[in-house]
Amino acid sequence: MASQTLNISDGTKIEIARLPDIDDATWAEVTEYLEGNPEIAKNLRRFASNPEAMRGWLQTQAIAEHYSTKLASGDTPVQDRIRALERDPELAPVLEDIKRNGLEAAMAHYQDEELMVKFSRKMLGVPQELEPTLRKIEETPLTLQEAAKHGDLAAVQEFLSKNRPLDAQDHRGITALGYAIGANRIAVAKLLLDSRANPFAVDASGNSGLHYAAGYGRRELVEYLLKVGTSVHQCNAEGLTPLAVATKNNQAATIQLLKAQGASA
């Protein structure tokens, strides 16, 4: 999925994913609006490290754009359904909240699955012609971390070609390398390490890549991490070494390997 760097009117910059299958003229209007509204752009930036939140925003925008086009073209059935929503005692306040508070309100309501089901029923479900766009948003890795977690080597290479920060942490404090190791994406993990990802980077709980590899029993990745110089003595926030984590999870293969390298619990 393509991305674009916006120059916000307060002097800051933000990179956002472009909505798939949106025409250039409409996308230009979206970016112009964001560049002229720093607060909305800053709210969006908060979601940038959380792919699920960003995916929700993209899907919400795609749906909103679909219905805006329908309304502008004078689509009577859609106009009638929107008017019905505005009269609905439960849903009308939600629409008003979104009008007043924009992106942040929209994202808060989007997380309410029961509410979204009610909206969908009122609008007679997701329009069939919109399903390919929503599916594309759902299936496309939006961050380097997601691409690494899914083992999408081509997507990882594309992110790297754009000089994305290798050691950037997501909303959970996990790097792309951490996800690759945790999901046993060996080719991706080796590519990231060969591209100079930091093998000592830790998540919010102080776990390094070696902690992940040891704890999940990833013997080949433990071997590779040891070759690039990771420490068997590095402790996480609980004071546990990789060997201690492996022992806790009964990972015999990595326990043996770590002990051979002089590790102690």
Image: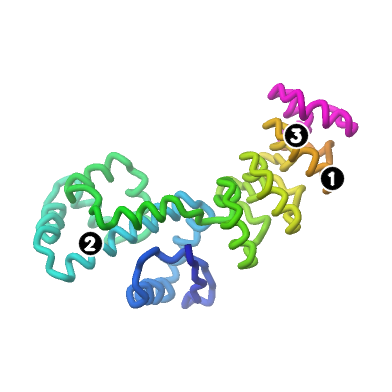
Q: Position of residue 64 (x, y in %)?
A: 28, 61
Amino acid type, callout 3: Arg
Spatial separation of the CA atoms under disc 2 and disc 3: 51 Å
Q: Is residue 195 magenta?
A: no
> Which residue is labeled 1 in the image?
227
State yes or no: discs 1 and 3 in contact (Cβ < 8 Å). Answer: no
Q: Is residue 239 magenta?
A: yes
Residue 245 figure quarter = top right
> Which residue is labeled 2 in the image?
67
Q: Secondary structure at mark 3?
A: helix
Q: Please tell me whether residue 31 is drawn above or below residue 176 in the rendered image.
A: below
Spatial separation of the CA atoms under disc 1 and disc 3: 12 Å
Q: Which residues are magenta?
A: 237-265
> Which residue is labeled 3 in the image?
219
* N-terminal label among 1 and 3: 3
Q: Position of residue 32 (x, y in %)?
A: 39, 76
At x 16% / y 70%, what residue is drawn?
A: 73
